[in-house]
Image: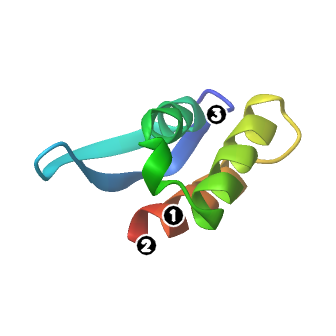
Amino acid sequence: MKPDMFKKPVRILVGLGFPTEVRSVMDAYRHLVEWPISLRDGPHSVALKACRAALRGEIEAETARGLFAAFAEK
């Protein structure tokens, strides 16, 4: 398994409510950078920083997954 892959994907709704599965740190990072600027908040910032850190190998992918999942649930 790649080091940025999640053990369990995070299911999110995109577009007009279409479900998709985020399977890696890179996928999560892409969703976060595409998030509208006007809707960005504290949890978004934390999740984005965590994904960047995980991509640099500074934290585990599962740590970034947890923070991304918390953002997605919000």
Residue at the image point whose x is 56% and y is 29% from the top: 26
| Amino acid found under the numbered disc labelled 1 | Phe
Q: In the drawing, what numbered circle is on residue 74?
A: 2
Q: Earlier in the sequence, mark 3 or mark 2?
A: 3
The C terminus is located in which quarter? Answer: bottom left
Q: Secondary structure at mark 1?
A: helix
Q: Secondary structure at mark 3?
A: loop
Q: Is 20 left or right of 36, judged from the image as shown?
A: left
Read off the residue under disc 1. 71
Q: Is 8 left or right of 41, judged from the image as shown?
A: left
Q: Is 55 left or right of 26, judged from the image as shown?
A: right
Q: Where residue 64 sits in the image (x, y, percent)?
A: 67, 52
Q: Where residue 30 sits in the image (x, y, percent)?
A: 49, 30
Residue at the image point whose x is 10% and y is 48% from the top: 16
Residue 33 or 51: which is nearer the viewer? 33
Read off the residue under disc 3. 4
Residue 65 or 34: which is nearer the viewer? 34
Q: Secondary structure at mark 2?
A: loop
Residue 43 or 38: which is nearer the viewer? 38
Whole-number angstrom distance, CA of label 1 to CA of label 3: 18 Å
Circle 3 crowding by C-alpha within 10 Å: few under 14, some 14–19, many from 20: many
Circle 2 crowding by C-alpha within 10 Å: few under 14, some 14–19, many from 20: few
**Image position of 26 with respect to 6: above or below:** above
Kindly check if marks 1 and 3 are in contact, taking CB atoms under 8 A apart as contact.
no
